[in-house]
Structure formats: C-alpha cells, structure tokens
C-alpha cells in the first residue's frame, strides 16, 4: 500500500509521466525514421496503461488473498491479540481500492 502511496505522490507522478512521454517520443521518432516500422506508438499507447492496470489489479488481489489468510488464521484464535489483528486486517482492507495508479479509474 505504501508503494502506491509513493507512486501517487504528485512529484513521482510527474516524473513517471515525463519518462513515459520520452519513451513515446523515441518510439515515434523510430517509427517515423525506420522504414517498415509502423504502429509502434499505437501499441505503446494501448499497452502502457493496460500493463499498469494489470500490475495494480495483481497487487490488490495479492493483498486481498494475504489478508484473507490472516483472517482465517486469527478468526478462530483465542489469542489476546486476536481482536486487534482482525481490526487491522479490516483497516487494511479498506485501503485496497486505493492501490491504483493515478491515471486509473476508481471503482
């Protein structure tokens, strides 16, 4: 979750956008200057956001699965920390939807 908080920091978002724009510009130049190379920018435009949406979906699913494992392990427990552990699991679950890149739509 902290990784996505970092990746959504305005300065980091700007830096990532600058790098992505630079890559796109290089691909555009390559496409323009190299005979037979066509559509590479279109592929970048389509696949760049799709890739990162898949990365964040994987992260959300992974965290959800781990929190479910923790809940299953602690739900029946009679340990003194049980209630605080389960409360923390619930708190973390509330943050899962925020594990997205700045450009992604929020559900």
Image (cartoon, helix red, strand yellow):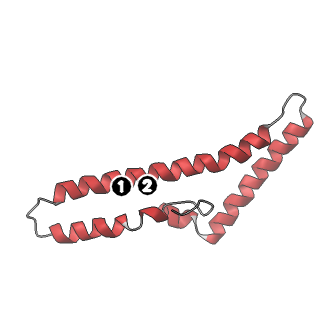
**Residue at (73%, 47%) from the top-left corner?**
45
Please state the horizontal and vertical placement of residue 101, each as a whole percent of the image.
57, 60
Q: Residues within 10 Å of mark 1 (few under 14, many from 20)?
A: some
Q: Does residue 2 appear in this view?
A: no
**Residue at (11%, 59%) from the top-left corner?**
76
Q: Which mark is residue 60?
A: 2
Whether pointer 1 and pointer 2 mark residues with C-beta atoms closer than 8 Å, the reply is yes
**Residue at (8%, 64%) from the top-left corner?**
78
Q: Is residue 23 above or below residue 88?
A: above
**Residue at (61%, 47%) from the top-left corner?**
50
Q: Quadrant of residue 44?
A: top right
Label 2: state its secondary structure: helix
Q: Nearer the viewer, residue 36 or 106?
A: 106
Label 1: state its secondary structure: helix
Please state the horizontal and vertical placement of residue 91, each as a whole percent of the image.
33, 70
Please state the horizontal and vertical placement of residue 69, each as a whole percent of the image.
25, 52
Q: Is residue 58 left or right of residue 70?
A: right
Q: Which mark is residue 64?
A: 1
């Amino acid at each position: 979750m902290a990784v996505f908080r970092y990746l959504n920091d305005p300065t980091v978002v700007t830096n990532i956008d600058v790098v992505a724009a630079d890559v796109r510009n290089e691909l555009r130049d390559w496409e323009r200057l190299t005979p037979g190379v066509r559509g590479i920018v279109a592929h970048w435009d389509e696949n760049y956001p799709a890739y990162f949406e898949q990365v964040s979906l994987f992260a959300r699913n992974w965290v959800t699965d781990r929190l479910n494992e923790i809940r299953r392990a602690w739900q029946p427990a009679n340990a003194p920390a049980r209630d605080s552990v389960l409360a923390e699991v619930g708190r973390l679950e509330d943050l899962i939807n925020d594990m997205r890149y700045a450009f992604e739509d929020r559900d």
